[in-house]
Image: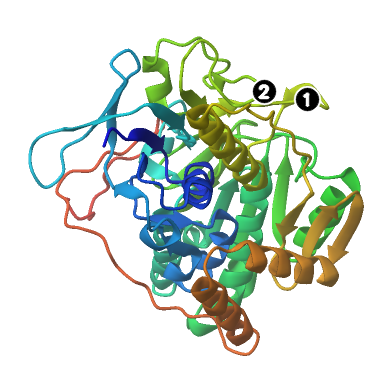
Amino acid sequence: MNRRRILILGGGFAGVYAAMRLEQRLKRRDDVEVSLVSRDNYLVFQPLIPEVVSASIGLVDTIAPLRRLCPRTRLYTREIDGIDLSARTVTLRPGARPRPLVLEFDQLVIALGNIPALGALPGVREHAMPFKSLGDALHVRNHVLNVLEEASIEPDPDARRALMTFIVAGGGFSGVELGAELNDFVREVVRDYRGLEPAELQVVLLHSGDRILPELDASLGRFAHRLLSGRSVEIRFGTRLASATASAALLSTGDRVAARTIITTVPSGPNPLLETLGVELQRGRLPVDPHLAVPELDGVWALGDCAVVTDPRTNRPAPPTAQHAIREARCAADNIVAAIDGGEPSPFSFSALGQLASLGRRSAVAQIFGIKLSGLIAWWLWRTVYLMKLPGFDRKLRVATDWALDLVLRQDIVQLKTDRTSSIAAEHFHEGEHLVRQGDFGD
């Protein structure tokens, strides 16, 4: 049978929910085949990643296997090497066998999202830790526990102070939630390390603007500022991370902060594959029409963070949030089915229901249907909403159990070492810093 081939690129919210919607709409039709290309074989529920750092929830409880979410979709867990729109093919990188895999398509859904962009700042790629994926969260957790272990046996007070200083760059949702969770975690577990005092800990949140959480109402941003400051988080406004070394962060204000932990939640950039399509981009993203189709390209659709989706109500681009990506996925899937069956496409239209941000330790801020909430009730709402949105009943049950146990049990301090043996590493140094001192181990 000559099947219509729908190929989806990207295993985030937009790509996975597009596949789920297509399965729902197509049922078991034999004339259409749906394929999904994803680097991983699971979907990460991004809002819960900060809680992996503190082990409030289990590492794998934030992820859902794609083969169970999309059982009738053919899954390719490969990196994408190239997209040829004229030949209507996508080339995947070699896997177990040293040869590429070429996939043909009739309908193409591009949902490649954003990628970390760390190369612009000196030393950041080498010495700052990005915070975007589940692997990043595990790496941050292991690193934090490692520096506390080192600090507990470090006799030099300056070196110990640097080990106990944690810098988080970015005052948006990711930075604030991570900073809050990290601050709660280190101040809780420091009691398990002999010789360390909570007063020695320093968690610094950098933000280039004049208030954190600029996506929310100003009053909620001020509440978050007061609460985090009361919990000893140092918030520096009008400040960006300028460069980094293995032992310090240089800030845009000219200050140099000795720190062994630098985490960046900004910036992120478009996937470089988009630049190879021969399509005029808008700030690195693909423009789409009201039906989420890429203009002048037959059977090519774009959604999620890699697309410029204009809200017809405000005439402004839709924000790169999960709730928008999910609705865009459903709309695009419906329009693809309409295109295959000769029906009429529907324009995308969606207004955000609200936004929530966790502030750790049973506190949060929320803005739902124009109603502003903060504190304990917002925290309860945050957990309720995200538990409902978490895909898969088994994941809901696991996370609910984790949260219940977290109310009565102490934080886990086991360091899970997954580093592989390496012989060469890159480091960045500021002018005047020492490369090696007398008595240092020659590595």
Q: Residue furthest bottom?
A: 408
In front of the other: 114 or 116 = 114
Q: Amino acid at mark 1?
A: Pro
Q: Amino acid at mark 2?
A: Pro
Q: Secondary structure at mark 1?
A: loop
Q: Is residue 352 at all visible to an observer of this figure?
A: yes
Left or right side of 218 for 21 = left
In front of the other: 375 or 125 = 375
In front of the other: 395 or 440 = 395
Measured as percent of width and height from the top left, residue 291 is found at 63, 26
Rendered position, 188 above or below 10 = below
Which image quadrant is residue 293 in? top right
Q: Residue at x 84, y 54 (%)?
A: 368
Measured as percent of width and height from the top left, residue 29 is found at 41, 47
What mark, if any, has residue 290 been given in the picture?
2
Q: Residue at x 39, y 67 (%)?
A: 146
Q: Is residue 242 at all visible to an observer of this figure?
A: no
Left or right side of 132 for 360 = right
Rendered position, 290 above or below 3 = above
Which image quadrant is residue 2 in? top left
In front of the other: 279 or 117 = 279
The quadrant in which the N terminus is found is: top left
